[in-house]
Image: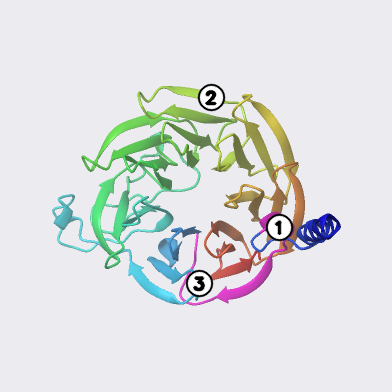
Amino acid sequence: MRKRVLTFLLITSLCAISVPAQGDVVSSKMVLIKTINGSISPKSVRSSGDGVVSAHNMMYRHSVTVYDAKTFELIKTVPDSVSLKSFGFSKSSSNFKGAPVEGSYSPDGKYLYVTNYAMYGPGFNKEGHDTCSPASGFDNSFVYRINRSNYEIDAVYPVGSVPKVVEVTPDNKYVLVTNWCSYTLNVISIESQKVVKTIKIGRYPRGIAVSKDSKKAYVAEMGGNRIHVINLDDFSVSYIPIGSNPRAIVLSPDNSMLYVTMNLSGRVASWDLIANKAGKTVKTGNAARSLAISADGTSLFVVNFNSDTISKVRTSDMKVLQTISACNEPIGITYDAPTNNTWVACYKGQIKIYSNN
């Protein structure tokens, strides 16, 4: 009897070793399963984590498109047209248009917050530019709140010039917005529905990541060489000397590691937040722009804008496991945990979806 039990255990162990568990992201290969076309020009894509993925289509399409994460069908096209007068921000009765850049979902799933690169309408006469400073005098812009019950814009928030990344804190207390040309971070209180703090960052603030306890926000200073670590209790700031040109940021699920794309060098850097020291870096391609991390924390997905590729990186040793041709100018990326799929925004007008199963 004991011999039979030992034999059964041995066979079971061998099967477990030889057959990767379904959803084992690091052991799988990215496989293209869907290409979405249409009236889109996505700068970014974002998974809600509960069944939808949104694409933010800038001033080229003036829209946010929302898709079913399982069927890939278009659920809704949300125009970026809004009456600022109805929200008390303009005397003009005209409808204004925005330019959706990035999005972030509230943790309760009720809202999608979207940044607008610029606004178009009466009183907006000096559209922002990628090369700028606070002295440029470019127009300030707005963040929209889209109510997911009807996919209509039900709130707007005045922010700085050329807002880029938006993140909602996990405790649903703040909406954080980096303002590219203002060199600042806006902190919007969800309770008061107002900007309660503006923090100076430096040249070209961009990526944001927030700790799961909502105590710290990490902000990339893309025109510099550091990550700003902001204490969300008292708004004090410390720094991580990550290196030149940091763009996008993600945290490991346990918040022990920070991963950053370094745009000019085409590398991804890591930082050990427990030991407070630099980890390994890896070259992924030319102009590493955005990145996402798998739910299990084993894999990073990186878009290489000038290489027209996406790369999969194993976080345990920062080794590139796979690099594949994606599309012309891949710019945004998101990982949808429920389906184990990676969505890639192609700036020229496509979305590519890759299975990791």
Label 1: few (<14), some or many (≥20) within 10 Å? Answer: many
Figure check: 254 above or below 102: above
Spot occupied by residue 33 in the image (x, y as percentages of width and height): 63, 74
Which quarter of the image is occupied by the N terminus?
A: bottom right
Membership of 330 in magenta stretch:
no
Image marks 1 and 2: residues in contact by CB distance under 8 Å: no
Which quarter of the image is occupied by the C terminus?
A: bottom right
Spot occupied by residue 94 in the image (x, y as percentages of width and height): 19, 63
Name the residue: 42% across, 31% down. Answer: 215
Image marks 2 and 3: residues in contact by CB distance under 8 Å: no
Q: Specify the amino acid type for callout 2.
A: Tyr
Q: How many marks?
A: 3
Name the residue: 46% across, 58% down. Answer: 49
Label 2: few (<14), some or many (≥20) within 10 Å? Answer: few
Labels 1 and 2: the sequence-earlier one: 2
Viewer-side residue, 81 vs 75: 75
Spot occupied by residue 161 in the image (x, y as percentages of width and height): 37, 43
Secondary element at tag 3: loop
Q: Nearer the viewer, mark 1 or mark 2?
A: 2
Q: Which mark is residue 70?
A: 3
Membership of 27 in magenta stretch:
yes
Q: Quadrant of residue 24?
A: bottom right
Q: Which mark is residue 140?
A: none
Labels 3 and 1: the sequence-earlier one: 3
On the rendered structure, is 259 left or right of 106? right
Which residue is disc 2 drawn over? 239
Q: Specify the amino acid type for callout 1.
A: Ser
Which residue is disc 1 drawn over? 307
Q: CA distance from mark 1 to mark 2?
A: 31 Å
Residue span colored magenta: 24-43
Q: Specify the amino acid type for callout 3.
A: Lys
Q: Nearer the viewer, mark 2 or mark 3?
A: 3
